[in-house]
Amino acid sequence: MSTMSKSVLRRLAIMQEANVKECKVCKERKLRILYGKFPSMNNKYVDEGGALWSGRICPPCNQVRIKTKMQQIRAGRKIKISQTEAEVILTEQEKK
Ligand SMILES: [Zn+2]
C-alpha cells in the first residue's frame, strides 16, 4: 500500500479513463482504479488515495465494514489479525 504514490494513481486513473463506480452502500459515485490483482487473480481496485475497494463497496464504507468484521473475528476466534489482512480476506470474500 505504501508504494502507491498519488501521481501513479492519478496516471492510472487517466489511462483507464477514470473508472467511476457507484458504491452499493453510500450510493456515491467514486473513482475506482484498477491496481493489479490478488493472488487469486481477482482484480484489485483502489481509490485515488490508494485505499482498497471491496467489490462494489467504496473504501470508506469498506473501512466501516472491516472494523465491524474485525471485532467479530477477534471476539469469535480470539486471534490477532491486521487491518491489511482483514481487507484482503474481506475483499476476496466479496468476489465469491
Ligand atoms: Zn460507499
Image (cartoon, rainbow, N blue to C red):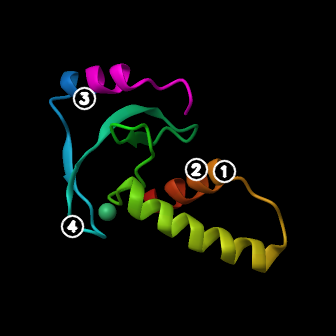
Q: What amino acid is found at the position of numbered circle 2 in the picture?
A: Val
Which of pointers 4 and 3 lies earlier in the amino acid sequence?
3
**What amino acid is at disc 3?**
Ala
With 81 as the anchor, is 46 left or right in this view? left
Query: How far, Cα to Cα, is label 4 from label 3?
Result: 20 Å
Image quarter of the N terminus: top right
Q: Are marks 4 and 1 in contact (CB under 8 Å)?
A: no
**Distance between the Cα atoms at labels 4 and 2?**
23 Å
Residue found at the far left of this picture: 17
Q: Name the residue nearer the viewer: 75 or 49.
A: 49
Q: Which mark is residue 85?
A: 1
Which labelled disc corresponds to residue 27?
A: 4
Q: Which mark is residue 88?
A: 2
**Residue situated in front as seen by the camera: 44 or 30:** 30
Residue farthest along the right direction in this orientation: 78
Q: In this picture, which residue range is highlighted in magenta?
A: 1-12
Query: Percent position (x, y) of residue 72?
Result: 67, 77
Residue holding disc 3: 13
Q: CA distance from mark 3 to mark 2?
A: 22 Å
User: For the residue labelled by badge 2, is the local secondary structure a helix, a strand or a loop?
Assistant: helix
Q: Earlier in the sequence, mark 4 or mark 1?
A: 4
* Nearest to N terminus: mark 1 or mark 3: 3
Q: Nearest the camera: 54 or 6?
A: 6
